[in-house]
């Protein structure tokens, strides 16, 4: 039985030419996306779809999303609205390796690809004035990447759609996958991606689905992609082969193939070891997620990370006032060390410069100190600000003279400093006592991890 593929929203011309490769080619149809109302009243997107056979009968499906389907008059009456069951069929189609799904996004109304069973990727309208689109990967003698790089000049400029990726890598080790950007504009906005089974560092292409831009010559695109996929999955399309028999190891003594086998065995052994290290890495990142949260989070999650850091790393006694006491104190921590008691406010903001009201709020809370029976308490402020920006690129907070003066009567801690002090304890043998001495000083807490490492290095050399 011949291999069957499906071309959705293509013409007889492409069908006839591709069929000359020795495979069966069917034509299908998908409408442009339209709005639907769910039972709960929410608005979703839907589309009508038609294929002569069930989708799992095809080894490869090309779907062109467009506002003007070329065979609308022929297939519109046969098309049915994509149901929940069909969405599951699309998902299982690529997820269970029943076939490869290739989506080509022209000018269309689709903003989600979930109705085609594709997660983690959304379509947005492009700016419409991109002049340049570049191939974003290293081809590395990989058949799929080499073809995608070769097809770059055929991309219609400007592209109609950008692709927003919600998650680039699997978060569990059960079935590892990676979404790679294929094409990007000069602003690093993605206009082409592919989903690959395996880790991001894998040197092997095992694609499950691709989302690509519109091209000037679809026939050439389809033929080249089919040939590349035939090399990767020869069991899918046995009719298509570009293998050069003159370089095949079949026509050499067994010594050559034995070496290939040893190479494969070594690669497989290395992959297993890498997978083990990756699992250990995932667990280590989970273990220290609270430290990472010092630089990325706000609200309760930031407060929780501060509590864990102060307790585990600095060995301080910390009480969450929100949980243990009924008072007017919000987002406050009570930190105790020897005779020192600190009432600390924890704040997180996306603003590049934190509001001075955070400092004022600390002084307001100090007026309530009699409510917590600690009249000699000191005020503290722990802030994670400009949290979307790389911590290394964030500016200094409260640098105006009048602001800096107010900090002298409280303890002010930038979470970057808290993070660096924690690393000094964990990675560079600073004692928790020394870390506490640096942290629990009135005014702005200053600490340079790089300078500390240099000092330790110089001390060891002497």
Image (cartoon, helix red, strand yellow):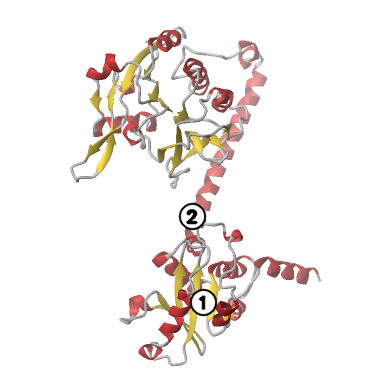
* Residue 408 spot, x, y in % from top left: 57, 83
Q: Which residue is mark 1?
A: 315
Quick one: SS at disc 1?
loop
Marks 1 and 2 sit apart, C-alpha to C-alpha, by 23 Å
Badge 1 local density, few (<14 within 10 Å), some, or many (20+)? some
Task: Kindly check if marks 1 and 2 are in contact, taking CB atoms under 8 A apart as contact.
Answer: no
Image quadrant occupied by the N terminus: top left
* Residue 148 spot, x, y in % from top left: 55, 26
Is residue 448 rendered to the left or right of residue 177? right
Nearer to us in this view, 202 or 332: 332
> How many numbered circles does the render carry?
2
Q: Which quadrant holds residue 38?
A: top left
Is residue 328 rendered to the left or right of residue 174? left
Q: Which residue is mark 2?
A: 283
**Residue furthest to the front:** 129
The residue positioned 40% from the left and 41% from the top of the image is 120
Image quadrant occupied by the C terminus: bottom right
Badge 2 local density, few (<14 within 10 Å), some, or many (20+)? few
Q: Which quadrant holds residue 323?
A: bottom left
* Residue 387 spot, x, y in % from top left: 50, 60
Nearer to us in this view, 242 or 39: 39
The residue positioned 35% from the left and 76% from the top of the image is 322
């Amino acid at each position: 039985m011949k291999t069957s593929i499906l071309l959705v929203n293509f013409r007889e011309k492409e069908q006839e030419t591709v069929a000359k490769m020795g495979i069966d080619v069917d034509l299908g149809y998908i409408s442009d996306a339209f709005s639907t109302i769910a039972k709960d009243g929410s608005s979703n997107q839907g589309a009508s779809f038609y294929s002569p056979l069930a989708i799992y009968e095809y080894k490869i499906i090309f779907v062109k999303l467009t506002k003007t389907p070329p065979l609308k008059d022929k297939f519109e009456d046969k098309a049915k609205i994509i149901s929940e069951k069909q969405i599951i069929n699309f998902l299982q189609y690529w997820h269970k390796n029943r076939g490869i799904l290739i989506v080509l996004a022209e000018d269309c109304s689709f903003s989600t690809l979930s109705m085609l069973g594709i997660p983690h990727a959304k379509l947005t309208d492009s700016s419409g004035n991109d002049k340049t689109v570049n191939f974003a990967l290293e081809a590395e003698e990989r058949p799929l990447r080499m073809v995608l790089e070769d097809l770059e000049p055929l991309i219609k400029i400007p592209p109609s759609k950008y692709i927003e990726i919600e998650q680039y890598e699997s978060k569990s080790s059960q079935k590892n996958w990676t979404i790679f950007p294929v094409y990007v504009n000069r602003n690093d906005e993605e206009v082409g991606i592919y989903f690959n089974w395996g880790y991001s560092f894998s040197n092997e292409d095992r694609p499950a689905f691709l989302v690509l831009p519109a091209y000037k010559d679809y026939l050439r695109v389809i033929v080249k992609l089919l040939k590349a996929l035939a090399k990767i999955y020869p069991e899918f399309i046995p009719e298509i082969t570009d293998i050069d028999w003159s370089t095949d190891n079949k026509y050499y003594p067994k010594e050559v193939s034995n070496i290939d086998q040893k190479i494969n065995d070594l690669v497989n052994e290395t992959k297993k070891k890498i997978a083990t290290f990756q699992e250990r890495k995932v667990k280590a990142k989970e273990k220290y997620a609270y430290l990472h949260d010092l630089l990325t989070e706000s609200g309760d999650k930031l407060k929780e990370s501060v509590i864990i850091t102060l307790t585990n790393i600095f060995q301080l006694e910390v009480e969450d006032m929100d949980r243990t006491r009924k008072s007017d104190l919000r987002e406050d921590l009570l930190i105790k060390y020897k005779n020192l008691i600190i009432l600390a406010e924890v704040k997180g903001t996306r603003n590049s410069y934190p509001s001075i009201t955070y400092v004022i709020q600390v002084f307001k809370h100090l007026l309530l100190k009699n409510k917590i029976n600690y009249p000699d308490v000191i005020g503290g402020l722990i802030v994670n600000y400009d949290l979307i920006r790389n911590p290394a690129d964030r500016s200094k907070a409260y640098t105006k003279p009048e602001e800096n003066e107010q900090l002298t009567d409280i303890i002010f801690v930038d979470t970057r400093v808290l993070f660096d002090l924690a690393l000094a304890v964990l990675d560079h043998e600073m004692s928790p006592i020394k870390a506490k001495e640096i942290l629990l000083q009135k005014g702005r807490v200053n600490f340079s991890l790089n300078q500390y490492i240099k000092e330790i290095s110089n001390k060891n050399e002497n």
